[in-house]
Amino acid sequence: MGSNAAEHHPVCFKWVLKAKEERGAKIIHVDPKFSRTSARSDFHVPLRSGTDIAFMGGMIKYILENNKYFRDYVVDYTNASFIVGNKFKFNDGLFSGFNHNLKTYDKSQWAFELDANGVPKKDKTLSNPRSVFQLLKKHYSRYTIDKVSSITGVSAANLKKTYETYAATGKANKSGTVMYALGWTQHTVGVQNIRSAAIVQLLLGNIGVAGGGINALRGEPNVQGSTDHCILYHILPGYLPLPRANLATLEEYNKANTPVSKDPQSSNWWQHKPKYMISLLKAWFGDTANKENGFGYEWLPKGDVPRGIEQGDYSAMWIFDRMYKGKIKGGSIWATNPAQSIPNSNKVRKALTNLDWLYSAEIHRNETTDFWHGPGIDPKKVKTEVFLFPSCHRAEKEGSISNSGRWVLWHHKAADPMGDSKSMGQIMVDIVNELKDLYEDKGGTFKEPIVNLNWPDNFDAEDIARKINGYHVSGENKGKLANSFTALADDGSTSSLNWLYCGSYTEEGNKMKKRDLSQTKLQAKVGLFPNFSWCWPVNRRVLYNRASVDKNGQPWDPERTVIKWDGVKWIGDIPDGGWPPLSTGKGKSPFIMQKEGYGQLYGPGREEGPFSEHYEPVETPVTKHPFSRQLSNPCAKIIDSDMDKRAVPADPKYPIVLTTYSLTEHWCGGGETRNVPSLLEAEPQLYVEMSKELAALKGIKNGDPVIVESARGRVEAVAMVTVRMTPFNIQGKTVHEIGMPFAFGWTKKGCGDATNRLCVSAGDPNTTIPEYKACCVNIRKADKVTELAYEDVNAGGHHE
Amino acid sequence: MKVTRREFLKVAGAGAGALALGGLGVNYLVTESYAKKLKTKRAKEVISICPFCSVSCHFICHVKGGKVVSTEGDPGYPVSEGALCAKGATMNTMINSNHRVTKPMYRAPFSEKWEEKSWDWMIERLAQKIKETRDKNFKEKNSEGQVVNRVEEIFHLGSSQMSNEECAVVHQAMRAMGVVHMDHQARI
């Protein structure tokens, strides 16, 4: 769901085909558009963009009411048996604790009921009406086939077929996997889309087992690694929370951010957080970080305490909103192209002209580096100083990247950087060294964090890789690389740039370079390659694998063993902690990163509720839906400015749903691939896919130039009239949906310009990921086009 | 059939050679003489990774005279087993593209063009700009009087194109400058 893997992750899709062809796996594709993924699946289920929770809610109801869930797993490994406190309520689309002014919840009202020891009360019979299990059943009982069908546009027959097929994986010897991509995350309910899958997978016992899981098909080259190293406002490397203004000292930070569990069966792994934080501070500030100065904690910037939808949120949409409003003066945009890739791109392009200075590191010039002479912008009026550093290609530098499965892979340097280009690492090292010199020579405001940086003279990937792994600063192993994060300490005796990667580069060497395909028979059966590269954490290939075995440590499915207790030790994968099985009385619950150790059917930490609930996209073609009177996500982060106009629900001016997608031949905004002639020849121009019915309604023929308009902008495209798009029957009315790629931009003349000019600046309340995948537009035949080299299209698609 | 990468290359080469010469049978001598003409002959092989999606298909660069002359999928990576998609297949063209930025470029305020500058000039001027903006706008306390030690006026975006090692130094640098406005493709 929410992925077109065959076209966007084609090389991994062959494993899906292999499962289908060799083992009879059933493949279901749920997506608005019929694509190559659909063509290779057992069946395709078109649904209207933004209605995935309704679809999944119906599946949860089906699983529960037809006893398709895996009872032992649900009772012992999930929080189904936990008793929820009596403040938790749900009424007409809102959970208890909602603050209408702030658009946030008081989440303390969703807390579990605790026993005298502070451990959540449980009812292992799952019959207590306040148990998670019974509340879950009640919550999703509303998601009937009729209601789900009426809002998603999926036929009742297709719903039943999907639910029956997928729920069959709730048996001990069956597994099912969910593959998703940006079609799920890029919604104002993105996190709850994935939460819905988590509920399904936990009910069916599909997490931690071979062939199970919820697989994010990550679309960017090292987006796993860049997330682990947290190029994100709200976290520090290794998913350590950003210090906030109410936590003035390291002690307060550790106290507020380190969970405490009173359950002896919970390993509560995050209890070790202070060790990772202090090792990070030692890595950042070296000898200048000591116990007396809180290891440099006070030198770190503190975010405001989150309040409402804006305060304390420093994410991309807010960055551009504040830039547009003149509050941001300068900054860096590295190997990313926001003038193409941020929603409401017209506003982004305007915002960039407010900067005093901007520096970029890029392989090619793109719509962002060259924003100052973009369409409709007069360079003579743009004050911005722009520094463009030539960045070298990956093949011209060495280092590691992490794939979607967390394997950390080393790439080697094949050739010298072209021309005067350098690696982004070297460029940043040089900039900071210059800055350090300036502060050391001339002084300046709050210079400590800069002059005290533990910073290299040159960028050497091997050297940084060792520092990421970490080493002993003092003690008997002084100078030695740490073997694993269990060696990291909270007293300043260890240094590590990222605890998760601890073990990747030890005294034995750089394990990311390993290319050994050897495996045991057990490992071969489930496709584990423990000796190829290295995988975080501690070379564990399948997360939460303790959930793949029963209480005696024996695999639910002996044919597909991830781990197994042989009476003395675990074999197979590296287990989630070396404790013996639960039946020994010395075991730990499998979900070790959760405070209580259980999979969260009920997730009281999410912003808009502990259960997922259907809400319409911020721009929706309907005025009501069958589940509540709460039309859209009550906590959605909606950005306002004079350029952030939105269609009203069921707006007659914008009646059509737009979704966007990538292409096999272009990568994301296309800034690189548009410069490769063969790829541009294969996919030369922006198009819009629409059904024959919509085309007939609008008098548009295949190949016509058209204009697609939203409340925020207009985009020219070539009409592609196709059976791949189908009109939806929504609450008895026809709703049309169209789809557009977003890879084309004005720097490659005639190919079209940013589709994201149409999209809405509204984000998920947990992540602020923008809602790219659903907004409302209209479409009409164009009299004249300026963005497309249209005659050239008629002549055969060739243009410069 | 289990084949080593070396054998795989031989087999692949034989297929290509035979086809190129229009022959259908396996004629070892013909294949050998064709192989001698391949531009990858005596090239050094270096393994890199496709810079696009997170499947992270490995590819082999054939390097001659310090220059990448050819690229192909790496059969030794168990996820891709040598396969590449349309993008990965063009890696040689991408690496050697004449569209690449190869010099530091500068655009002055209100200017209509890029100018080439030296690395030193660029780094020195940029560092001054960062310092100027940081020193002028540094915020010790927020409106509630809490210590925040940050600079809201400077932002950073990107990138998932960086290696882990590059990400590590960029993150460290940004926090040292006091940056909270930081984000990248994982969210957008």
Image (cartoon, coloured by chain):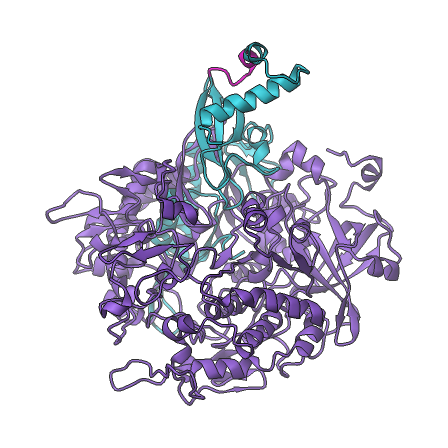
Chain colours: A purple, B cyan
User: Which quarter of the rendering shows the N terminus of chain A?
Assistant: bottom right
User: Which quarter of the rendering shows the C terminus of chain A?
Assistant: top right
Residue A474 x %, y %: 14, 48
Relative to A63, residue A472 above or below: above
| Quarter of the image where one finds residue A769 | bottom right
Majority SS type along the magenta span: loop
Residue extending furthest front? A558
Horizontally, residue A605 falls left or right of residue A571, namely right
Q: Which residue is drawn at 33% across and 35% down?
A: A460
- Magenta includes A605? no
Horizontally, residue A470 falls left or right of residue A618, namely left
Q: What span is colored magenta in the figure?
A: B35-42
| Quarter of the image where one finds residue A748 | top right
Q: Residue at x 59, y 48 (%)?
A: A21
Relative to A79, residue A324 above or below: above
| Quarter of the image where one finds residue B87 | top right
Q: Is residue A710 visible?
A: yes
Q: Which residue is drawn at 32% across and 59% down?
A: A576
Viewer-proximal residue among A30 and A612: A30
Q: Which residue is drawn at 84% across and 52% down?
A: A782
Residue A26 x %, y %: 59, 57
